[in-house]
Image (cartoon, rainbow, N blue to C red):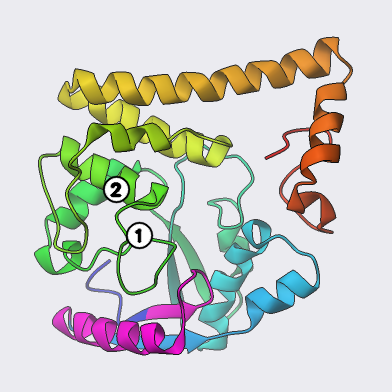
C-alpha cells in the first residue's frame, strides 16, 4: 500500500522505556524515516492506557480499539493496521482481523492488513526495502532501539539468522542457546514460535529446528497438564496456582482470558 498511504502514525502508549528523551529521539528518527519514503509522520500521545488500567480493562483486549480510534480522531479516510496473527490463529486478541474493520465509521474505513502472511514472510518483504529494514523496531523495552535480548528481539533475530540476512537496527544472533528463552507461555507466543519452526524447517536448519521444537514441546506438556487437571482433578491445580500466584488478570473486569480456561 505504499502508493495509497500518505501518513505514518506513531502512538506513545504501547511500550516501556518511553521517557521524554527517548520519545523525542524516536520522533526525530521517524520523521526522517517517513521523509525517506515520501510520507509524513503523525506522532501522538495519549492517556488511553492509563484510562484502561484505571477501568481494569486488559490492554490485550483494548489495544485494537485504541488503534482503530486513531483513524477517526485524525480524520483519516482509510487506516491500515498491521496484523498481529494470521487467519490460522483466530484466537481472541485486541487487534483482530474480524473485529478491527468493525470499528470503521461513515468517515473512516479500517483495514486489518497482512493476516495472510506469517511473520517471517513479512520480514522477507521488509528486507526488500533497506530503508524500512534498517528502521525495524520490535523491542518492547525501549521505543527507539532494540535491546537484542527480549523475546521479541530474539525471535526476529532468529528469523533473520534463518534467512541469512541482517539489519542495522538489530544485532545478529550469535549464540543459538539464546533461542531457549523462546518457550511459549500462551497461545500468542505459541503462534509466534510456530512461525519460526516452519521457517527453520523450510530452510533446512536442523539445529535451530530442534531447539525451537523442544521449546514448543514444553508448552504442549503444560497444556496437557491443564487438560489433565480439568478432566481428572476437577481443576484443583488451577485453583492452587491462582491462590499462590495471584495472576494480575484475575483482578481485571474485562480480559481475554476465561476464568474456566487458561491461567496465563
| Residue at which label 1 appears | 138
Distance between mark 1 and mark 2 Cα atoms: 8 Å
Which picture quadrant has residue 232? top right
* SS class, disc 2: helix
Q: Quadrant of the C terminus?
A: top right
Above or below — where is 132 with respect to 37?
above
Q: Residue furthest top?
A: 232
Which picture quadrant has residue 91? top right
The question of residue 105 being in magenta is answered with no
Count how many numbered circles sit on residues in the image: 2
Residue 156's disc is 2
Above or below — where is 2 with respect to 39?
above
Please report the bounds of the magenta region as a residue range.
9-37
Near mark 1 (Cα within 10 A), the count class, few <14, some 14-19 or many ≥20, is: many
User: Residue 121: where, in percent of width, then height?
Assistant: 26, 43
User: Residue 62: where, in percent of width, then height?
Assistant: 66, 64
Residue at the image point whose x is 65% and y is 16% from the top: 224
- In the visual, does 204 lie left or right of 44? left
Q: Quadrant of the N terminus?
A: bottom left
User: Residue 90: where, in percent of width, then height?
Assistant: 56, 39
27 or 109, which lies in front?
A: 27
Amino acid at each position: 500500500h505504499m502508493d495509497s498511504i500518505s501518513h505514518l502514525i506513531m502512538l506513545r502508549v504501547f511500550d516501556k522505556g518511553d521517557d521524554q528523551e527517548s520519545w523525542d529521539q524516536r520522533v526525530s528518527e521517524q520523521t526522517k524515516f517517513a521523509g525517506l519514503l515520501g510520507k509524513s509522520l503523525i506522532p501522538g500521545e495519549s492517556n488511553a492506557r492509563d484510562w484502561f488500567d484505571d477501568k481494569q480493562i486488559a490492554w490485550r483486549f483494548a489495544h485494537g480499539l485504541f488503534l482503530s480510534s486513531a483513524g477517526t480522531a485524525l480524520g483519516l479516510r482509510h487506516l491500515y493496521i498491521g496484523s498481529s496473527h494470521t487467519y490460522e490463529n483466530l484466537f481472541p486478541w485486541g487487534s483482530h482481523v474480524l473485529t478491527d474493520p468493525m470499528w470503521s465509521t461513515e468517515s473512516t474505513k479500517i483495514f486489518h492488513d497482512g493476516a495472510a502472511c506469517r511473520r517471517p514472510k513479512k520480514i522477507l518483504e521488509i528486507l526488500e526495502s533497506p530503508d524500512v529494514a534498517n528502521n525495524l523496531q520490535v523491542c518492547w523495552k525501549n521505543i527507539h532501539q532494540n535491546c537484542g535480548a527480549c523475546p521479541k528481539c530474539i525471535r526476529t533475530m532468529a528469523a533473520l539468522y534463518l534467512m541469512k540476512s541482517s539489519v542495522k537496527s538489530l544485532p545478529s544472533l550469535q549464540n543459538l542457546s539464546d533461542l531457549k528463552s523462546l518457550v511459549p507461555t500462551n497461545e500468542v507466543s505459541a503462534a509466534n514460535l510456530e512461525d519460526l519452526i516452519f521457517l527453520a524447517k523450510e530452510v533446512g536448519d536442523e539445529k535451530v529446528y530442534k531447539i525451537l521444537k523442544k521449546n514448543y514441546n514444553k508448552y504442549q506438556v503444560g497444556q496437557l497438564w491443564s487438560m489433565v487437571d480439568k478432566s481428572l482433578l476437577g481443576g484443583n491445580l488451577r485453583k492452587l496456582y491462582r491462590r499462590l500466584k495471584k495472576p494480575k488478570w484475575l483482578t481485571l473486569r474485562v480480559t481475554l482470558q476465561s476464568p474456566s480456561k487458561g491461567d496465563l
